Image: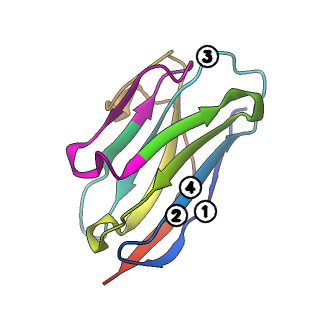
Amino acid sequence: QVQLVESGGGLVQAGGSLRLSCINTDRAVSSFGAAWFRQAPGKEREFVAAISWSGGTTDYVDSVKGRLTISRDNAKNTVYLQMNSLKPEDTAVYYCAGSKNYYSGSYSAEYDYWGQGTQVTVSS
């Protein structure tokens, strides 16, 4: 059974950086689009970034373009979210998602697997 385990969250000052990691514990999965979503207190979950299995296709929500970068290392079964120039409005629980499709973009309904979430808090 596929399990996604996130790590790397924490407390950081505005302008700082964090790198989130998401490891897929099921090495048998051969095609796995991935994404990061986030949910702030009192708000609905929103799409942050997505990446195809090969890493050749990526997409971002406008509010994070130029600051956050999604990447992956398939040899390590891991997807990353490098977060730079963080802002207080980036504060949220960040969730890793995995899809049986090669690439699923921003559509949360197309993701089959979800991690437990990791808290990111950005202080002003």
Q: Nearer the viewer, mark 3 or mark 1?
A: 1
Contact between marks 1 and 2 (CB within 8 A): the answer is yes
N-term mark: 2 or 3: 2
Q: Which of 22 and 72 is in front in this view?
A: 72
Does 59 appear above or below 38?
Answer: above
Query: To which residue does mark 1 refer?
Result: 8
Contact between marks 1 and 4 (CB within 8 A): the answer is yes
Residue for point 39% across, 50% down: 68
Q: Which element type, helix, strand or loop, lies under badge 2?
A: strand
Contact between marks 4 and 2 (CB within 8 A): the answer is yes
Q: Distance between the residues labelled 3 and 1?
A: 24 Å
Does 36 appear above or below 38?
Answer: above
Contact between marks 2 and 3 (CB within 8 A): the answer is no
Which amino acid type corresponds to the residue marked 4 in the rendered image?
A: Leu
For residue 67, side relative to residue 77 (left or right):
left
Q: Residues within 10 Å of mark 1 (few under 14, many from 20)?
A: some
Which corner quadrant of the image does residue 39 belong to?
Answer: bottom left
Which amino acid type corresponds to the residue marked 3 in the rendered image?
A: Ser
The quadrant of the image that shows the N terminus is top right
Q: Which element type, helix, strand or loop, lies under badge 1?
A: loop
Residue for point 54% across, 73% down: 10
Q: Which of marks 3 and 4 is in front?
A: 4
Which corner quadrant of the image does residue 50 belong to?
Answer: top left
Q: Where is residue 103 in the image (x, y as percent from the top left)?
A: 44, 19
Q: How far apart are marks 4 and 2 (CA)?
A: 7 Å
Q: Which of 111 and 23 is in front in this view?
A: 23
Which amino acid type corresponds to the residue marked 1 in the rendered image?
A: Gly
Residue for point 31% across, 52% down: 45
Q: What stretch is highlighted in magenta?
A: 50-68
Q: Which mark is residue 20?
A: 4
Q: Distance between the residues labelled 3 and 4?
A: 21 Å
Q: How far apart are marks 1 and 4 (CA)?
A: 4 Å
